[in-house]
Amino acid sequence: MNLQIPRLVLGRLGVAMITLLIVSAAVFGATQMLPGDVAEILLGQAATPEAVAGLRRAMDLDQPAIVQYANWLYGLMHGDLGTSYANSMPVADLIGGRLLNTLRLGAVTAAIAVPLALALGISTAMFRGSTYDRAISAAIIAIISVPEFMIATLAVLVFAVWLKWLPALSFGDDVQSIGEMLRVFAMPVITLLCVICAQMIRMTRAAMISVLDSPYVEMALLKGASRPRIVLRHALPNAVGPIVNAVALSLSYLVGGVIIVETVFNYPGIARLMVDSVATRDLPLIQSCAMIFCVGYLILITLADVISILSNPRLRK
């Protein structure tokens, strides 16, 4: 019994590693199918065939795809992300500062989204069927129905163009004070909150309602326990697993949402770097950025899975 939990956790980590290996093959294959020849793009239209062939040999692009994939995967496993085709700089140096900006944006969003969504999800479950519950549910459906790029565009029109309260572009590395930080992060964070909060509130509400309908909660209610005591003492501890899953799944939406947000607001993060690198067919940079997003997604999902196993004995069977 004591070895059951470590065995299950190691099993989940093993599945995550196998998934990451499959994802790496998919990322490499997808980048190989990008249209255009990297050497021709870098040398320009006036390049001779001999110069193009020489550059392809210098970048090992004349090697079979399986050999290129093996070399790239070997480099990743040893912490070598390769060299950028467009800038001739180590990919790790190009990604370093951009990754920090993206993590900063994600941390600010998560710090606001998680407590806000949990409070709204739990409170709507407690007052299920009330006017408050119906109003929050209607607002969530309205937000989910609007794609994030539309929310970002509307935010620019309202707050930057009409009201002139906030800048239309967000340069995260120009922050010198708390006031500037609020102005820079306001619209990207609001957009991302609309993306992840709605899903998190819905899943948290559903998890809490499932627990509140349990027989032991009804027994506690018959014994005269107050509603706050029932929620905090009986329902919430048993809903930790589903709620953590809801939080992790919702935060994983940041991966997709941050690409759109950084592009719309010209935010200097890793997603914007990946979008720019697609235009120059900078394959090592595209592959490294994509793998960082995939690793972040897998970490969130695996962490939620492990916490669910630890919090729910039925999942250990």
Image (cartoon, grey):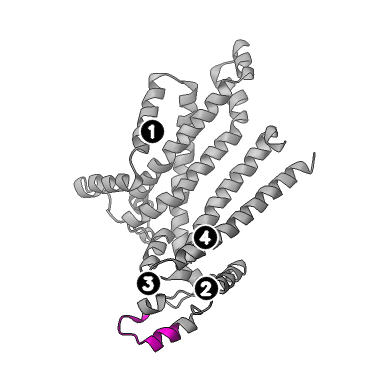
Cα–Cα span, label 2 and label 3: 21 Å
Residue at 60% from the left image edge and 20% from the top image edge: 214
Choose between 184 and 306: the one closer to the eye.
Answer: 306
Q: What element carries label 2?
A: loop
Which label's residue is closer to the chain start, 3 or 4?
4
Q: Which mark is residue 265?
A: none
Q: Quadrant of the N terminus?
A: top right
Q: Residue 26 carries which label?
A: 4
Choose between 34 and 142: the one closer to the eye.
Answer: 34
Residue 46 in magenta?
Answer: yes
Which label's residue is closer to the chain start, 2 or 3?
3
Cα–Cα span, label 3 and label 4: 19 Å
Neighbours of disc 1 within 10 Å: few (<14), some (14-19), many (20+):
some
Neighbours of disc 4 within 10 Å: few (<14), some (14-19), many (20+):
few
| Amino acid tagged 2 | Gly
Coordinates of residue 37 in the picture (x, y in percent) = 39, 75
**Mark 2 = which residue?**
82
Coordinates of residue 124 in the picture (x, y in percent) = 45, 25
Total numbered circles:
4
**Mark 1 = which residue?**
140
Cα–Cα span, label 3 and label 1: 43 Å
- Horizontal relation, residue 40 to residue 284: left or right: left
**Mark 3 = which residue?**
36
Which label's residue is closer to the chain start, 2 or 4?
4
| Amino acid tagged 4 | Ala
- Horizontal relation, residue 22 to residue 117: left or right: right
Mainly helix, strand or loop, the magenta region?
helix
Q: Closer to the observer: label 1 or label 4?
A: 4
Task: Look at the image and give the residue range highlighted in magenta.
Answer: 43-55
